[in-house]
Amino acid sequence: MPSLMQTETIAGGTASTELENGTLTLLHGALEKHGSAIAQASSFSVEDVVVTDLLTRIRSDVRVFAIDTGRLPEETLLCADAVAARFHIQIEWFFPQREAVEKLIREQGTHSFRESLEKRHECCGIRKVEPLSRALAGLTAWITGLRRDQNVSRTQLNETEPDLLHGGILKYNPLAAWTAEDVLAYAKSRQLPFHRLYGQGYRSIGCAPCTRAVQPGEDERAGRWWWESSEHKECGLHARH
Ligand code: SF4
């Protein structure tokens, strides 16, 4: 496993105790209610690392899963290793179906997702959505690091909601009311592992070919699928219904 020296940590902030305590109470109730049938989905964003930290403050044996789409930046994998080491957890990795990826690449090339919204959804469907459905099988609830103010597609986000895309299991969004500043302050105060690409101007990080750094003043998710319009900034994992 790579050493923690390969991933940054972030230090210096002061978290809001009231916000933190409210979120801890929500997560405590979720873990009590669902036992081992609840897991966190992590992409190793700063929000997801904050959620893992909050969860492990409540219970040491929390389940954290991740999807390796096959197109992740190296820095994401390094951050994943740092998170596993910091919290003494084993990440439950899920991969796309090999046959589906081979068919996609052989028939459409390596960058078909740039050609149309339909083709981008096809790639996300194979590399993200299908593995997610396997990750959620058998769970009664899952936990995300989504925030309301990340993008216009997330303004209606609730802290707890039924996930109708996945059989109505519960979806917890404990950071729904947190701002980017709240998240950063908490991450600093806890000196959490920090994805290196944030240091290069990235604000929201997904697959390498579909993510770029953003300019000051740009929307947080402007760097995701930047060739598409802002209402299309989802990949099917968190589609609103
Ligand atoms: S983000 Fe891009 S590379 Fe990743 S699954 Fe979606 S379309 Fe494919």
Image (cartoon, helix red, strand yellow):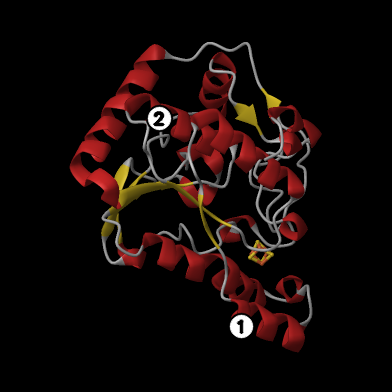
Residue 114 appears anywhere in the view = yes
**Residue drawn at x 68%, y 63% as measured from the top left:** 70
- The spot of residue 53 in percent (x, y) is 46, 28
Figure check: 78 above or below 103: above
Task: Indicate the secondary structure of the residue bearing disc 1.
Answer: helix
Q: Which mark is residue 73?
A: none
Give the mark nearer the N terminus: 2 vs 1: 2
- Whether pointer 2 and pointer 1 mark residues with C-beta atoms closer than 8 Å, the reply is no
Q: Which residue is mark 2?
A: 56
Q: Which residue is mark 1?
A: 99
Figure check: 50 above or below 123: above
Badge 1: residue crowd in 10 Å (few <14, some 14–19, many ≥20) = few
Give the position of the C terminus as an image quadrant: bottom left
- Foreground residue among 131 and 170: 131
Task: Indicate the secondary structure of the residue bearing disc 2.
Answer: helix
- The spot of residue 17 in percent (x, y) is 39, 13
- The spot of residue 77 in percent (x, y) is 67, 47
Figure check: 133 above or below 195: below
Q: Amino acid at mark 1?
A: Glu
- Foreground residue among 151 and 39: 39
- Foreground residue among 41 and 199: 41
